[in-house]
Image: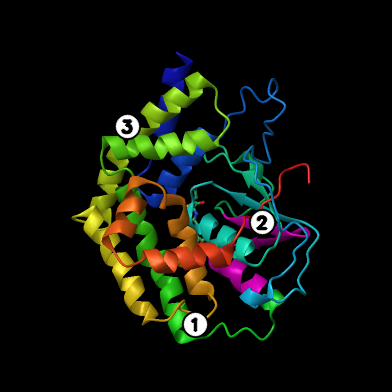
Amino acid sequence: MRGVNRAMVLGRALRSNFTAVSGAIATVHHVPRHAASNPSFAPTVTAFRYISTAANSVAHDAHSKPVNFKPNQVVLFQYQTCPFCNKVTAFLDYYDIPFKVVEVNPINKKEIKWSDYKKVPILTVDGEKMVDSSDIIDKLIKRINPDYDLDAEEENKWREWVDNHLVHVLSPNIYRNVPEALESFDYITNQGNFSLSERLVAKYGGAAAMYFVSKKLKKKHNIIDERAALYGAAEQWVDALKSRKFLGGLDPNLADLAVFGVLRPIRNLKSGRDMVEHTRIGKWFSEMDRAVGESSRVNEHS
Ligand SMILES: N[C@@H](CCC(=O)N[C@@H](CS)C(=O)NCC(=O)O)C(=O)O
C-alpha cells in the first residue's frame, strides 16, 4: 500500500514540463523513511558519496585554472538530474571548487523553505545566495578571473542553445520506451539510498509515469523523432567546434562546460551510448571528461 501511495505521489509530481520531469526523478531520490535507521543516510546533505581528490582546491596548470578563489563553504541545493544543476556541478568540478549538495524534495521543497526563490539550482557561497545556473556561473567565473569576458558572442550563443534547446531533447530520449525508462530509473535509484521495496516502486512506478510524460514533452517541444533530435544536437555541437579541441580552444569555456554538464548524466544510459556511437561527439566528450576530472563534491562530514 505504501508503494501505491508512493507511486501516486510520483504521479502528482508530474506536470508536462521539463521541470516536473526533474522533480519527479528527484522525488524518488528523497527517501527520508529509513534515514533514522541507516546512519549512512543524511536527510539533507545527500547520501551520494563522492571521494574528492580536489578537496583543497588545487588547480592544475594544464587546465589554466586560476587558484585565487577559495571559499570556505559552497552548498548546492539541487535535484540530482536537473540539467541546470548539472551545469553548475560541471563548472564546480572543472574549477576544483569543493561543494556540498543538498538534495531538494520537489514536492514540498522544504530544504529551500528559507529561500524566496523556489527553483533549483541555488548555490550558497560562504552564506551568500546565488540563483539561476547561468547567473551563478557568471558570478563565480568573475570571482575566479575578474577579467573573464562574459560578452564573447560565440560562447554566449552556445550557452543559450544549451538552455533553450539541448535540455529539451534529453527527457524524451531517456524515457523514450519502456526498457529505456526502466534503465534510467534503475540508474537513478541505484545511485540513491533505497531499500529494495522503495527501489522497485520508484523504478517501475517512476519509469511508467515518465514514459507517458516524455510523450507529452515531445509534443510540447515539437520533437518528432527523439533520437534524431539528440543526434542532430550532438552534430550541431561538433560542427560548432570547427575542429577545435574545445569551443574555448585548448581549454573548455563556459559553453563546453554547459554542454558537458547536461550530457554527462546520460552518457552511460542507452541514449548516451547511442549518441556517442552514432555521432562525432565522442572525441570531445572524452576530452571534456579528462579536462573536468574528478568530482569536487564532498560529503556531509567533510
Ligand atoms: N533558468 C533557471 C531554470 C531553473 C529551473 O527551471 N529549475 C527547475 C528544475 S530543472 C526548477 O527548479 N523548477 C521549479 C520546480 O521544480 O518547481 C536556471 O538556469 O537555473
Name above or below for residue 243 compared with residue 269.
below
Q: In which quarter of the image is the N terminus?
A: top left
Q: Position of residue 14 (x, y in %)?
A: 39, 39
Foreground residue among 256 and 222: 256
> How dense is the environment of label 3, judged by Cα within 10 Å: few (below 14), some, or many (20 and up)?
some
**Amino acid type shown at disc 1:** Gly
Q: Position of residue 151 (x, y in %)?
A: 53, 85
Q: How far apart are marks 2 and 1 (CA)?
A: 24 Å
Which quarter of the figure has residue 47?
A: top right
**Amino acid type shown at disc 2:** Ser
From this viewpoint, is residue 107 visible? no
Q: Where is residue 295 in the image (x, y as percent from the top left)?
A: 62, 55
Kindly state the secondary structure of the residue where label 3 is placed. helix
CB within 8 Å, label 3 to label 1: no
Q: Closer to us: mark 3 or mark 2?
A: 2
Q: What is the total number of numbered labels drawn onto the structure image?
A: 3
Q: Give the range drawn in magenta.
A: 121-141
Task: Inspect the magenta stretch and tell me whether residue 123 lies in it.
Answer: yes
Res. 249 mark: 1
Q: In this view, does 222 lie to the left or right of 243?
A: left
Of labels 3 and 2, earlier in sequence is 3
Q: Name the residue under label 3.
A: 208
Name above or below for residue 27 compared with residue 155.
above
Q: Residue drawn 54% across and 68% down?
A: 134
Q: In this view, does 270 lie to the left or right of 20?
A: left
Q: Distance between the residues labelled 3 and 2?
A: 34 Å
Res. 296 mark: 2
**Amino acid type shown at disc 3:** Ala
Name above or below for residue 78 compared with residue 32.
below
